[in-house]
Amino acid sequence: MREGTRLGVAKAARSPPCTLPFLGRRFFKEASFSIFVTVISLLKRVFFTCAVTALFSGTAFADVAACPEGSVISSISYEGLEHTKARVVERELLNKAGEPFSAEKFDLEKRRLQDLDLFTDVSVDCNGGNLKYSFVEIFRWIPAPAGKTTERDGLMIGLALANLNVLGEDIRAEVQYRTSSERFLDNNEYAFYASSPYLFGLPLGWNFEFLRTDSYDDIRDYQDDSWLIDLDLDYQLLPHLSILGTVAYRELEKAVFTFDEDSAELWEYGLGFAFDFRDTKIDTRKGVYYEYMLTHVKQLDRIAICGGSCYTEGEDYWELLNDARAYYPVGRFVTGATALVRYRPGEVYRFDYFSHGGVNSYRGRYGDSKRLGVHEALLNLEERFILLDRQPASIAGVNFFYGVQLVAGLDGSLIWNSGRPGWDDYEGAVYGGIHLVVPAVDRLRFEVGYSPDRGEPKYFFGMIEKVSTSRWRGR
């Protein structure tokens, strides 16, 4: 299941050698590749260490002056749930009636409730033995401009109508139309999204997507007139273990890379699992996440071609995905290390090649046809400074929240077609920027990247966490 928020949202020439007096391209490449290897090793150590310690330790105590620590809770009540059913909140609570109040539990509760992306603020008050939770709900209807950034279409703009809390059950639904700002009204996208972390009270997260695309892909050089229907499932088997499943159908009307230039139909189905010890899924501050997914992609209308020998024509491959993330806070600083590796044995056609270059993959270059490949590894080491933590606000009765974070980090990009990757398949870059934390799309990202291989800064604007957008950056 795709990670992250549940709301859908020119070619560079090779530059002269770097002229920095103390840091040449060769040194930078070696240093960044060493960090690449080091962080993968670090991810292994941090994952197993945090997985064990997370079972025996909690988060820091919250400052809850109104509720004495250890006072027995006789009853629990809610205030401010105008459009949200109580059970949506209750399944996130850790403090229970008949038990002593714990500020530590409330601190974790508040992070989990904020992670629902339904409330701008959550507070608690004690009146005798009654524990009262007060909520300020986010404005649930969003008729607004729709935007997102992709590496092939750049900034896309349009119109959308979204409901963040359908029937009060934490179900999100959105319809939208978007067109590329670079090829206005030529590259178009029509979409419907719906998702929820529960299904009929069961811990079965689901994400449904319907997408119609009419767009020229100048990175892979073909006309993408396609239809996509996708369903992702996430069943929480244990508190920190989920079983994942996915099924998707794609139709490419002008599949110029197949034997039939009129159309191609493809099915995808996959299974996997995920260990999740993060404090929250959105704006993670602490914890680890590891996912393994095995997906089979096969073209339905494959045919046998016989000449001197017989063979089949059509896309048919397996994808082995590993997604590892680790976060650790020190004061206002949050250190994050992530690695996304996808290996695809089989017959992969050009329209499914990975592209590295852009705000959603590798910030050392813009996306172009020179950095395409069948297999990929994306690594990131990032430091965030919480300049302004999440703050509730309201304008004309519309409730929302905002925050500001400064970021700096290192991107590693490894992309290749067959065999083992070599030194020429790797690039590294540094970047920095500012993130605005907002509802619905998690964050707005303004970033500048620099790679000695390119020799000049690259400027990017993006939405949603890169660890999420890198999983579906093609669209």
Image: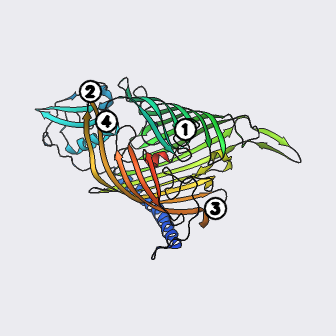
| Tally of numbered discs | 4
In the picture, which quadrant includes the C terminus?
A: top right
Of the two numbered discs 4 and 3 in the rendering, the one whose residue sits closer to the viewer: 3
Side (left or right) of 14 relative to 20: right
Amino acid carrying label 3: it is Arg
Residues under labels 2 and 1: Cα distance? 42 Å
Q: Nearer the viewer, residue 380 or 141?
A: 141
Numbered mark located on residue 420 in the image: 3
Which of disc 4 and disc 2 is earlier in sequence?
2
The residue at 68%/49% (across/down) is: 346
Whether residue 398 is visible, yes or no, is yes
Residue 81 marker: 2
* Dot placed on the residue nearer the N-terminal end, 1 or 4: 4
Marks 4 and 3: CB-CB under 8 Å? no
Residue 184 numbered mark, or none: 1
Closest to the camera, between mark 2 and mark 4, is: 2
* Nearer to the camera, 468 or 278: 468
Kindly identify the amino acid type of the residue bearing the numbered disc 2. Leu
Q: Label 4: how many residues lie within 10 Å, few (<14), some (14-19) or many (20+)?
A: some
Residue that appears at 31% across and 49% down: 404
For marks 2 and 1, give the one nearer the viewer.
Answer: 1
Question: Residue at 69% of width from left, 43% of height from top?
Answer: 316
Q: Name the mark on residue 92.
A: 4
Tell me the amino acid under the disc marked 4.
Answer: Glu
Q: Where is residue 145 shown, x and y percent of the image?
A: 43, 34
Secondary structure under tag 4 reads: loop
The CA span between labels 1 and 4 is 44 Å
